Amino acid sequence: MSGGSARSLAKGSAPPGPVPEGLIRVYSMRFCPFAQRTLLVLKAKGIRHEIININLKNKPEWFFKKNPFGLVPVLENSQGQLIYESAITCEYLDEAYPGKKLLPDDPYEKAYQKMVFELFSKIPSLVASFLRRQNEEDCSGLKEELQKEFSKLEEVLTNKKTTFFGGNSVSMIDYLIWPWFERLEVLELNDCADHTPKLKLWMAAMREDSAVSALLTEPKVLRGFLSLYLENSPEACDYGL
Amino acid sequence: MEDATRALGKGSQPPGPVPEGLIRIYSMRFCPYAHRTRLVLRAKGIRHEVININLRNKPEWYYTKHPFGQIPVLENSKCQLIYESVIACEYLDDAYPGRKLYPYDPYERARQKMLLELFYKILGYQNTIFFGGDRISMIDYLFWPWFERLDVYGIADCLNHMPALRLWTAAMKQDPTVCALLIDKNIFLGFLNLYFQNNPDAFDYGLPC
């Protein structure tokens, strides 16, 4: 398994060759929370994979042949099949590969995880808006909204009476939402979880998970990336290499 | 039609538990999202009962079925509630035997889900009245024929969904070009009827003799 710390490919780069058999390729970016979902599932299921990082501020032309939307993550297998949209890539991996199932077999429990995923769905754009905030007013408004969303998740944990969102062990829904919670510290949004103690406990428990801890990014590296990214610097995606 | 019942509104009695062997759908006869779930129930031959909800005058008890009072919602005899139309459809495919609607192959399943995202992105691309801006342009004409045909089937949009698309359809119908070529609903339905019977006279349906 290689490529996680490889320099990103940009405009003018040669397109990569076909994916060797026995391997699956993920087009990614070291700091992208959506791509992190796919990397978490690859790790949790022990799937042999290679990573090609894409410079999202200076995309290679060939990348639009992999995903017409030009976004990461994208999976490419040795049959040349392409799968994109992070949640779809995660479900595909769970279905196509053996080993520990991250989604439950029970139809209702599986549907329940998807309903929780819907509950979470406003958080990525709130966090993105927070990153781009212009002033203090935006800041407090956004923090309030984030707290509201966190309360919804707290309610789930309260009703389920389990540590994780799918039960007493980590499962798909936990991996799908984790990347944004990893970023709270660096964004100075940790206090938004002050009124949601079970969510806080969940965050601590997630850090103990082997896939999560293997993919944690050092806060100062994340900060370095964020400031370059907000300035639209083409160097952002390779920060720290 | 199992769903030809009056919609329940404020002040109505909450329904009892769902009997075993049945699944219940909270629905509305003209809602396209609930329509999805009813299609799957029918396609899989799943025994179900329909409770229509008055979306402009929701029963207070309905918020115990869905936190925001949306439809569709499935309720089974174990009191489990499933909502979001796509999630409900997948649940039915997983939980019930018989013909599988999603493919078995993981890649083909993923492809169907990617297509659905494309559909939402098309709807999401619209942030002005017309798809290309504030005036009708090529892309609107390129989309219109499919939407005109949907409109001919007379399914009024669910009032809470897709207001932008409703506005677009109304705006399109004011365009002189679109108007001039609008297909008469009855003639179109007459055509379809003959077409599906492989009748070669289909193509001339509605022309003066």
Image (cartoon, rainbow, N blue to C red):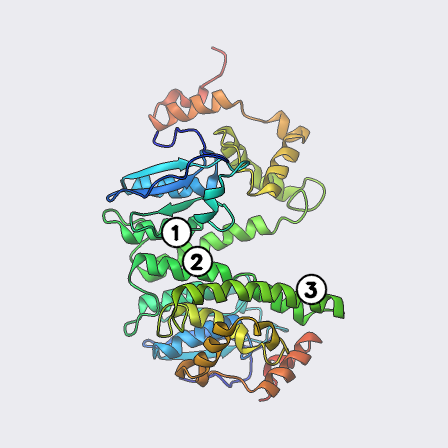
Q: Which amino acid does the dot numbered 2 rest on?
A: Met
Cα–Cα span, label 1 and label 3: 32 Å
Which residue sits furthest top?
A: B209
Quarter of the image that includes the C terminus of chain A: bottom right
Cα–Cα span, label 1 and label 2: 8 Å
Tag 1 subunit: B
Of B134 and A7, which appears nearest the observer? Answer: B134
B170 displayed left or right of B33: right
Name the residue carrying label 3: A141
- The circle on residue A115 is 2
Of A83 and A230, which appears nearest the observer? Answer: A230
Q: Earlier in the sequence, mark 2 or mark 3?
A: 2
Q: Which amino acid does the dot numbered 1 rest on?
A: Ile
The residue under the point 34% across, 79% down is: A46
Cα–Cα span, label 2 and label 3: 26 Å
Q: Quadrant of residue B29?
A: top left
Is mark 1 in CB contact (under 8 Å) with mark 2? yes
Classify mark 3: helix, strand or loop: helix
Up the image or down, B177 lies above or below B134; here it is: above
User: Measured from the top left, where is residue B71 in percent x and y?
Assistant: 46, 44
User: Measured from the top left, where is residue B3 in percent x and y?
Assistant: 38, 32
Classify mark 1: helix, strand or loop: strand
Of A225 and A182, which appears nearest the observer? Answer: A182
Quarter of the image that includes the N terminus of chain A: bottom left
The residue under the point 49% across, 51% down is: B67
Q: Quadrant of residue A18?
A: bottom left
User: Measured from the top left, where is residue A219 in percent x and y?
Assistant: 58, 85
